[in-house]
Image: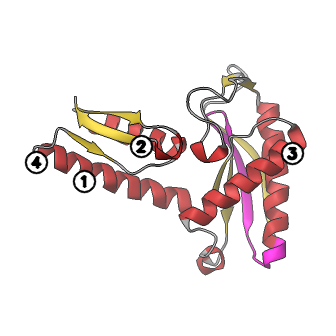
Amino acid sequence: MTDKTGLTEVGTVTADNADVTAHTADPSSDASESGSVTDAPVTTDQLEREGDIAADYIEEFLDICDLDGDIDIDARNGRAYLAVKASDADNLRVLSKPDTVNALQELTRLAVQNKTGSFSRLILDIGGSRETREAELATLVAHAIERIEGGATAADLPAMSSYERKLVHDIVAANGGYRSESSGEGRDRHTVITAA
């Protein structure tokens, strides 16, 4: 049986700044970064509702799959964030693969949109998949920087979602001496790293 824990505030959504402007969505969510998703304020109440709807959807999915897991709901950077955890790491191994997480995230976003009538930018993490992906992205950035230090003028990373590109931009900024920008359109959108 799954267990949902309540929404907790994480940093950016507070009573003082409850209106957080929505940023662009993942290309995989049928919205481009050029603004086809209208920027609308996201309130804490909206994020709580999205989180509850998404948790119900994921809980039902886990029950159908006969998998045990606990669901934590947070609000981070103007998005509902769901983390599915299990005491037995093997329990969620199949679901925590990147492509599976992304597909299930899109289905969950559609379930939320169906109930709310609004596009959802929620993030789904299954079995620590997001933390694992962040480590992989840090390794990609390190290799790209090595190529630049070896004489390349720029290093292109593979195409990835806007969420992952944001993580890459943050990693590059933390390294100092380098800059990154997104290039390309739709599913081909990727990050290019250059020396600052």
The residue carrying pointer 1 sits among few (fewer than 14), some (14 to 19) or many (20 or more) residues within 10 Å by Cα, namely some
Q: Of label 3 and label 4, which has the lower sequence position? A: 3
Give me the residue at 66% from left, 42% from top.
30
Out of 190 and 176, give the one closest to the viewer: 190
Is residue 159 visible in the rendered structure shown here?
yes
Residue 190, label in figure: 2
Give me the residue at 80% from left, 55% from top.
55
Give me the residue at 82% from left, 32% from top.
45
Horizontal relation, residue 76 to residue 169: left or right: right
Q: Of label 3 and label 1, which has the lower sequence position? A: 3
Which residue is under mark 4?
150
**Spatial CA span between label 2 and label 1:** 16 Å
Of all residues, the one furthest to the top in this rendering is 16
Residue 114, label in figure: 3
Dot 3 amino acid type: Asn
Of circles 2 and 1, the one toward us is 2
Where does the C terminus fall, quadrant-wise?
Answer: top left
Rendered location of residue 175, percent (x, y): 27, 39
**Spatial CA span between label 3 and label 1:** 41 Å
Q: Is residue 43 magenta?
A: no
Which residue is under mark 1?
143
